[in-house]
Amino acid sequence: MWAKAEGIDVLRESLGASLVNGIPHHDTFGRRLCRLNPLVLEESLHIVRKHLSNGTPTHIALDGKEVRGSHNAAQQWPAIILLSAFATDSGLVIGQQKVDATSNEIPAAVEVLNQIDIAGATVTADAIHCQRDTADTIRERGGHYLLAVKENQLGVFTAVTQLFQTNREERCLPMQFRQIVNEHPRAA
């Protein structure tokens, strides 16, 4: 679909191919793409992303997504989960890491953060990433973070809640209030 939308003249120029038999069939594209070394492709895409992003982003959002259709119960293949670092300034995914099927997003977050330049950027992530390793990695790499906190991490939740309460009562720092957002209200 992409090749047809671009047209044969554009493909000839951008791909540097003669395409004497016209636009290749999608199976031909598939065979060629399967021959690419994924690590070399990722390195090449990283160079392109760096060029397109105009430097270090100011905001990077970490988020994990399950690849649709990657689960195969008959073959006992677990779903593929990818953790992406999305630069909101440029609208580009600037880093991506496959989550190990025997683990979760936490180690993948540290890996992807070590692959990209985050100096001066604010990294946001959902509550699963409210971990010491993730926060330490961000700070060591010169970034800032804003991580969600949920009640299922009671120690952190209590400490943050008490900090806001104390600062509100004593009028310390610029913190004036706290707000608890209950996304999934408990059934009555």
Image: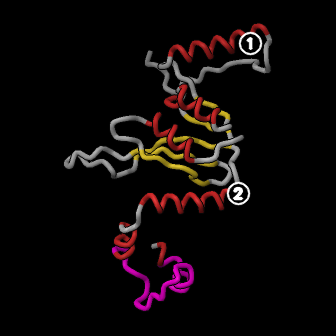
Residue 135 image point, x, y percent: 59, 30
Amino acid type for the residue under numbered disc 2: Asn
Q: Are marks 1 and 2 in contact (CB under 8 Å)?
A: no
Instruction: Tell me which numbered mark, 1 or 2, is placed earlier along the sequence.
Output: 2
For image coordinates 45% across by 44% down, the residue present is 65
| Mark 2 surroundings within 10 Å by alpha-carbon count, few (fewer than 14), some (14 through 19), many (20 or more) | few
For image coordinates 52% across by 44% down, the residue present is 112
Amino acid type for the residue under numbered disc 1: Asn
| Residue 13 is a magenta residue | yes
**Distance of label 1 from label 2 (alpha carbons):** 39 Å
Q: What is the image's colouring? A: secondary structure
Q: Nearer the viewer, residue 63 or 5?
A: 63
| Residue 16 is a magenta residue | yes
Q: Nearer the viewer, residue 45 or 166?
A: 45
Q: Which residue is mark 2?
A: 54
Residue 33 image point, x, y percent: 40, 68
Q: Is residue 94 above or below residue 111?
A: below
Quick check: 51 left or right of 188?
Answer: right
Task: Please provide the residue range marked out in magenta.
Answer: 4-27
Q: Which residue is mark 1?
A: 167
Q: Could you say whether the residue bearing mark 2 is in a helix, strand or loop?
A: loop
